[in-house]
Amino acid sequence: MAKFSKMQVMAAMKETGMVPVFFNKDIEICKNVIKACYEGGVRVFEFTNRGDFAHEIFGELVKWADKECPEMILGAGTVVDAGTASLYLQLGANFIVGPNFNPEIAPVCNRRLVPYSPGCGSVTEINNAQAAGCDVTKVFPAGNVGGPSFVKNVMAPLRWSNIMVTGAVEPTEENLTPWIKAGVLCVGMGSKLFPKETVAAGDWAAVTAKCKEALGYIAKARG
């Protein structure tokens, strides 16, 4: 059962403006990454369904985070079918994210009032997802479908939209500022926030510092 309400999830996404996206088959690495992000000010974290037995790792992380990072909102990403969404909801996912929009996932999440953020690459997809009850739509891959200008131009006619962007997002002022100015609700960030060499070295302090830096740029851009 989700620990946080839909309103709490969306408020946290908006307030911090960034959702780290991560997967590793080593649960201890995952714990260290989540804790480092938490200490850096992050309150929403997307664990991606990208490896064998990923759901088993997620289930353990939810129980662990409840004690170690009580304000962290954990969700599941790379969910492409309704069965997988149900599985993660049962394990305590507070939100579901996908690289695509699958209309069959929306009612599964809506029944439990859990946000479903599907990947969309056009105005029609975004609008169809909203009609299905998706309060936050993810533009993916954001860099390929048009970047910040795409978001800005979508927000003109669909000004009520809550858009998360993932893909081609980096923790630099030069990259983050245009996305924020375009009107995104939040950005999703993976490999640029957790370089392989940083994870391999176990330099969790560097992850915390990078999170603080990125959140600072987001706050500055919002002015």
Image: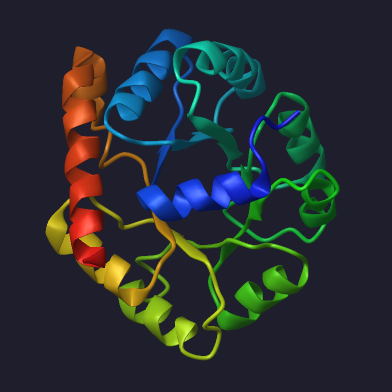
Occupied quadrant, residue 64: top right
Query: How are the colours assigned in the image?
Result: rainbow
Q: Residue furthest top?
A: 28
Q: Is residue 119 above or below residue 52?
A: below
Q: Position of residue 51 (x, y in %)?
A: 56, 26
Occupied quadrant, residue 14: bottom left
Whether residue 185 sits left or right of residue 206 in the image: it is right
Q: Position of residue 169 (x, y in %)?
A: 30, 55
Marks counted in the figure total 0
Q: Is residue 106 visible?
A: yes
Rendered-image quadrant of the N terminus: top right
Q: Is residue 134 above or below residue 92?
A: below
Whether residue 123 sits left or right of residue 130 in the image: it is left
Whether residue 168 sits left or right of residue 117 in the image: it is left
Rendered-image quadrant of the C terminus: bottom left
Residue shown at 30%/67% (left/top)?
179
Q: Is residue 77 above or below residue 150?
A: above
Q: Position of residue 215 (x, y in %)?
A: 25, 47
Instruction: Pick the residue in front: 144 or 7.
Output: 7
Whether residue 183 sits left or right of residue 214 in the image: it is right
Residue shown at 71%/75% (left/top)?
128
Q: Position of residue 148 (x, y in %)?
A: 32, 74
Residue shown at 20%/23% (left/top)?
198
Q: Is residue 166 visible?
A: no
Residue shown at 56%/84% (left/top)?
158
Q: Residue furthest bottom?
A: 157
